[in-house]
Image (cartoon, grey):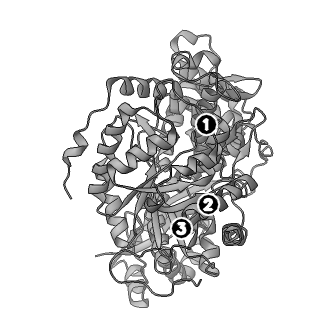
Amino acid sequence: MTVPATFLKSGPRPLARDAVGLGLRPVHLAAIRESPPDIDFFEIIAENFLGRSEAPRRNLEAIAARYPVVAHNVSLNLLGTDPLDFGYLRRLRSLVEQHHMPYVTDHLCFCASEGTHHHDLLPVPLSSSLVGYAVDRIRAVQDALGVPFGIENASTYLRFKDDDLTEQEFLRRIVDGADCGLLLDVNNVFVASVNHGFDPHAWLDAVPWERVFYVHLAGHLQRPDGLRHDTHDRPVDDDVWALYREAWRRGGPFPTLLEWDDHIPPLDVAVREVRRAIEMRP
Amino acid sequence: MNDAPPRAAATPPAWWRSLQDDVGRFLRSPLEVDGGRFHSPREAAAALHPRVVDDGPGPGAAARLALYHEQYWMRLFHTLQQTFPRAARVTGYFAFNRLAAAHFATSPPRSADLADVGRGFFTRLQAVLDGLLVADARARAPHGVIDARLPSLIDGGDDLDELDDQLRAVRAVLRNVDVPWSMLAQALALDEACRRAFEAPTAPRWTMTPEVIAGVRASRLGVRTAASFSLVRVDWPVEAAAAITPSLPENALANAADADNGPEPPAPSTTRLRAPIHHVIVAREGGVAHGIVDPVFARLLLRMRHSRFDDAVRHIEQQFPPAALAHLQASFDGFAAGAADNGWWVGTTA
């Protein structure tokens, strides 16, 4: 595996199926400039590059000239009841086209209501009566973006009494209905499995592997009360690595991306952590 | 691309809209402050509790709802601390978070860009303080030079009925922040200058040729100052080096611990600097740039935003000793080239 040295002039830049990548964080920019790391792609949190400040967009230009970049979102509010923000989607599409991103993703959650943003990935009832609504919203997003769109399974800490589906059934129906991709977060599967008491391996049984764009890994916290807290502030848990191996065995190869959002280590440490994925593959 | 694809017209089930609104109101409801910590009061989740599974493995519904509630607030506190790092250090994190809580109670986030949550904080805090500082302190001097410590400046009257909840909360906080008001004001001003520069447009790089410098010196040409330019005079030891790089992590849950329960910063030194420092702050490619200029050139920069070199020289002549003017005349060419290199000056005006 080598760092891509060429910049395609047109069209999306697909990722190799065995690619490994990192979430791009401002704290690593200088280190990346100084010594470009041996990884295959970066993932951006798109909202950070579509605000008022030009600085992040300028920094991204240099990164995207060397590496493929994919756009991940945290605010599309896919299952929200506020209207979709088509102004934001237009700006996002422009960014995606500028950097030839192969696809865009966000979480199956809601994150705003009554015109206020909660800046969190909030859980939704796993209700069959929400499937059609989710499908409509995701199709609208996909149409607006003009590139394949994928949804990510979120970490959750509570379940609603309105649930009449399992999470994997809910996700599967929506993915099939919207004909969209899946960003499979293995850490989130594990965190939710502990918090809600299900078998994460059985969860993998329902994954439509042909729809998986790529896989997320991250670290999480084990709280004293037993809840697993999706903190992205430490290395990947051994149990999550084990689940990753199982996922690879069932659906690999797929690109793999490490997220590290707090107590972010030096770039070389983060790179070593994501490259462990290569060793973990069966 | 269509502006309004037909599928966007999908309407959510009424029960789902109602549940979401309840969740939003729950998240925005204030945390309780108890024993120097913020926590979610049990009664805040009363409306949601019956909707949430309570018999699963591990902790019950109350603890799970509290996790989301505290996470909402801690993420906002953490972001505001990052946006106003000097002010947070001057007040201490706990006091700063209480000021932040008062801010967000009246201005909940309405943008998907987390960096936007700092907008309005500076202006709001200034306005709130205006209403709280005792009248004679206000009359003595403008904000920047009121040197008395905050607890002695906060109006101590018993007119609580005349204060709304937010003012009352801010007053309670500031009575326990034992630093000079001018120190907090300077920290806030520096932070706000950086915040504004971060979101301001970056001007293209510009180089001043010797001919242009000569034209400016002869007052045939004026200079255009960068839109993001701020000059802040500081004479308290508020650290100037912190860079501002707001970003929106996918999941900043660990911030929940750091923003509230992490160690407080060391108490700030309240020994005044022997000489004021003039900070120049401007947007640059990739971020925010700081520079420091001496008082003469600080005055020159301010004056030349609206007038030409000869007018600035006359002004400086009146304000500074003759040696300062000689220094200005001798150093101007190099200073001008540097002002362009640093992005402070971005072009000429005819």
Q: Disc 1 residue type?
A: Gln
Residue corresponding to mark 3: A254
- The quarter in which the N terminus of chain A is drawn is bottom right
Residue corresponding to mark 2: B243
Of the residues tagged 3 and 1, which is closer to the observer?
Answer: 3
- The vertical placement of B157 against A71, above or below, is above
Spatial separation of the CA atoms under disc 2 and disc 3: 37 Å
- The quarter in which the C terminus of chain A is drawn is bottom right
Residue B111: % across, % down: 41, 44
Say if residue A69 shows up in the picture: yes
User: Depth check: B340 or B124 in front?
Assistant: B124
User: Depth check: B271 or B25 in front?
Assistant: B25
Mark 2 crowd level (few <14, some 14–19, many ≥20, 10 Å Cα) = some
Where residue B1 sits, quadrant-wise, is bottom left
Q: Disc 3 residue type?
A: Phe
Q: Secondary structure at mark 3?
A: loop
Residue corresponding to mark 1: B71
Q: Is residue B95 left or right of residue A73?
A: right
